[in-house]
Image: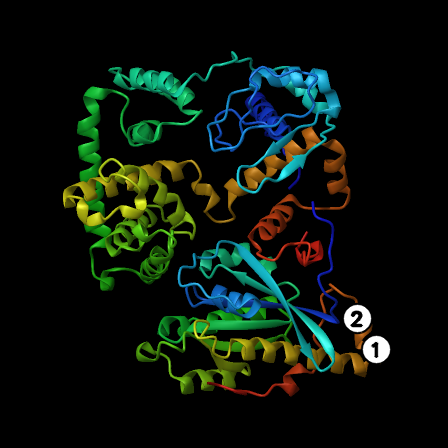
């Protein structure tokens, strides 16, 4: 992974955005738009206060990009913060000393303090956006950054993924057509005897049928055969229509949030009490189709993570490398001098996340990995 | 970050890999051996995981670092690093799904392409508790193992049948090879560097017995 020359100004601005987010994370603060488990108790903090105690509880993050500048200038490289995660009470103290952050934060976009108002005010805003004859997706997306009320998710997800058209006059018709199209695909690709499938297709279906019963295995709702069959049809149909990647283990986990969200339009209460038999069959077919199309839209943006040689992942690794270079040049230089390859580093990091053995006990030496 | 903590002393560290088709029970074999746990509700493995456990062989502590990976073919290329430095392998199939046994040959080829020729390999027929669903006979598997010069055992991670034996056998065989090799070159086996990949000696094939203890 040598440096290439594909850095452009748009790449630059995206990097700066990421930098800003990383910077927020390092300070134990929230990333705009990301759901975090922390929340500050004092919206207008004292810049001299070096330690804050966030309240506990799951909540939507506040958009505090506007105040982070203040933190930087007042604390400089001595910036410290403590944050507590809601369940394990881990206290982290980080002392970032990155000179680049100050430079990058100069162009942090100012957003007004209190941009995120109370939930009911947000619901009103969402309702207003959604009721427009043509939904302005940019505005909806911006609103959605701070989270979407659960009951609005089906509608908003369909819109933001580009599945449902913004124009309300066309919406029902398009959805009807797309749902029928999905049914046609299922009939054409899935509902056929194995003798009409190629060996690769048989293998792929087998892989999917091995994975569906062990998808979300800890939620009984997903143990129902009908749910597993729905998932199987969605995944297989997607895989057949995307032969460059086909089904790759893990895609199953990307489909399940759609199932839950779209089912929530019809099934009440907690998912533990849901039964698929409470649902009219035609509704289930619509839901399945919506899941299929939304999964497709989601994967459209990252299919090259799953194709040969994984160019999408390589690209992300390059961005990470570039980010580290900007945030912490000495670390970046050290890695280069030691010939450490980011891809393998990530492999090792992923491994240590996956492993149940605490890596204090047995961390695989980097020598195990090809550099 | 937590400070390094040596949870135990060991004389040898052996890397052992688990391979085989998706859904044959690799992760449950690992959890049964390292934590004595079994889960009917396990998820598919994404990427790579590993766990360790130490056993005693003779008067030595042998620490097994066992790597577990996704069975889907697509993940094999990604995890070729997986094989590096492995001195033992459990090649797992599911006795109730014949296709997983048919694929053993491909797994064996891949294993041999990526590892030292002297790696200790055990063919493992898992889910032996599902007697009424059996699709691969013990005889077929044993014959295959003899032909391919690998060890063979049938296991049940669910019933905890032979899991301990399978891992222990592989580790003991690796130990025999390594300690014998060390004696040959006149080294003290305990002086071998810890945490390093240990090369299996050249004469391992001569020591292999086949079908040592099938169920």
Camera-side residue of A185 and B3: B3
Residue lying at 77% horizontally and 34% vertically, measured from the top left = A330
Q: Is residue A67 above or below residue B13?
A: above
Residue lying at 42% horizontally and 20% vertically, measured from the top left = A142
Residue A219 horizontal/vertical position (percent)? 35, 51
Mark closest to the chain's N terminus, 1 or 2? 1
* Local SS, label 2: loop
User: Going by the image, does A274 lie left or right of A60?
Assistant: left
Q: Chain of mark 2?
A: B
Residue B76 horizontal/vertical position (percent)? 51, 59
User: Going by the image, does A144 lie left or right of B211?
Assistant: left
Q: CA distance from mark 1 to mark 2?
A: 8 Å
Q: Is residue A338 above or below residue A171?
A: below
Residue lying at 34% horizontally and 55% vertically, measured from the top left = A212
Q: Disc 2 marks which residue?
A: B192
Q: Is residue B84 above or below residue A262?
A: below
> Is the residue marked by circle 1 packed among few (<14), some (14-19), or many (20+) residues within 10 Å?
few
Q: Chain of mark 1?
A: B
User: Going by the image, does B30 lie left or right of A322?
Assistant: left
Which image quadrant for residue B6?
Answer: bottom right
* Local SS, label 1: loop
> Is the residue marked by circle 2 packed among few (<14), some (14-19), or many (20+) residues within 10 Å?
some
Can residue B202 be seen in the rendering of this structure?
A: no
Which image quadrant for residue A20?
Answer: top right
Residue B109 horizontal/vertical position (percent)? 52, 71
Residue lying at 37% horizontally and 57% vertically, measured from the top left = A214
Q: Disc 1 marks which residue?
A: B187
User: Going by the image, does A257 lie left or right of A95?
Assistant: left
- Is there CB contact under 8 Å for labels 1 and 2? yes
Camera-side residue of A318 and B172: B172
């Amino acid at each position: 992974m040598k440096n290439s020359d594909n850095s452009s100004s748009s790449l630059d601005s995206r990097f700066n955005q990421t930098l800003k987010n990383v910077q927020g994370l390092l300070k134990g603060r929230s990333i705009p738009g990301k759901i975090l488990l922390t929340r500050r108790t004092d919206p207008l903090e004292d810049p001299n206060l070096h330690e804050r105690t966030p309240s506990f509880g799951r909540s939507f993050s506040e958009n505090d990009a506007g105040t982070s500048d203040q933190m930087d200038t007042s604390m400089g490289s001595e910036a410290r913060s403590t944050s507590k995660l809601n369940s394990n009470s881990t206290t982290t103290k980080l002392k970032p000393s990155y000179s680049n952050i100050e430079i990058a934060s100069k162009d942090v976009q100012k957003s007004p303090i209190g941009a995120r108002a109370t939930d009911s005010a947000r619901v009103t805003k969402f309702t207003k956006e959604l009721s427009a004859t043509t939904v302005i997706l940019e505005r909806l997306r911006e609103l959605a950054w701070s989270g979407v009320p659960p009951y609005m998710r089906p509608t908003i997800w369909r819109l933001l993924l580009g599945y449902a058209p913004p124009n309300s006059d066309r919406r029902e018709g398009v959805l009807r057509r797309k749902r029928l199209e999905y049914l046609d695909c299922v009939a054409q690709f899935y509902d056929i005897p194995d003798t009409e499938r190629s060996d690769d297709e048989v293998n792929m279906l087998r892989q999917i049928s091995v994975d569906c019963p062990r998808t979300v295995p800890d939620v009984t709702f997903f143990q129902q055969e009908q749910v597993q069959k729905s998932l199987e049809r969605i995944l297989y149909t997607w895989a057949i229509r995307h032969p460059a990647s086909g089904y790759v283990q893990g895609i199953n986990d990307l489909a399940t949030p759609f199932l839950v969200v779209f089912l929530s339009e019809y099934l009440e209460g907690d998912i533990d009490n849901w039964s698929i038999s409470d649902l009219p069959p035609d509704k289930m077919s619509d839901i399945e189709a919506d899941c299929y199309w939304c999964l497709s839209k989601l994967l459209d943006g990252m299919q090259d993570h799953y194709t040969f040689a994984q160019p999408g992942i390589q690209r992300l690794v390059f961005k990470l490398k570039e980010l580290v270079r900007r945030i912490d040049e000495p670390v970046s230089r050290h890695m280069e001098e030691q010939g450490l390859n980011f891809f393998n580093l990530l492999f090792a990091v992923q491994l240590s996340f996956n492993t149940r053995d605490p890596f204090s006990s047995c961390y695989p030496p980097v020598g195990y990995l090809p550099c | 970050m937590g400070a390094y903590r040596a949870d135990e002393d060991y004389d040898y560290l052996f890397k052992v890999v688990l391979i085989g088709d998706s859904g044959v029970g690799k992760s449950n074999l690992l959890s049964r051996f390292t934590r004595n746990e079994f889960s009917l509700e396990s998820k598919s493995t994404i990427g790579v995981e590993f766990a360790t456990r130490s056993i005693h062989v003779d008067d030595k502590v042998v620490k097994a670092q066992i790597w577990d990976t996704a069975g889907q073919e697509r993940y094999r290329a990604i995890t070729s690093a997986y094989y590096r430095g492995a001195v033992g392998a459990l090649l797992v199939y599911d006795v109730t799904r014949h296709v997983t046994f048919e694929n053993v040959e491909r797994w064996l080829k891949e294993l041999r392409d990526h590892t030292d020729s002297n790696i200790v390999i055990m063919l493992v027929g898992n889910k032996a508790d599902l007697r009424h669903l059996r699709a691969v006979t013990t005889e077929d598997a044993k014959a295959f193992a003899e032909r391919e010069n690998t060890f063979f055992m049938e296991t049940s991670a669910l019933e905890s049948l032979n899991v301990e034996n399978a891992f222990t056998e592989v580790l003991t065989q690796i130990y025999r090879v390594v300690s014998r090799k060390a004696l040959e070159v006149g080294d003290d086996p305990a002086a071998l560097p810890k945490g390093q990949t240990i090369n299996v000696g050249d004469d391992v094939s001569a020591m292999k017995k086949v079908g040592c203890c099938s169920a």
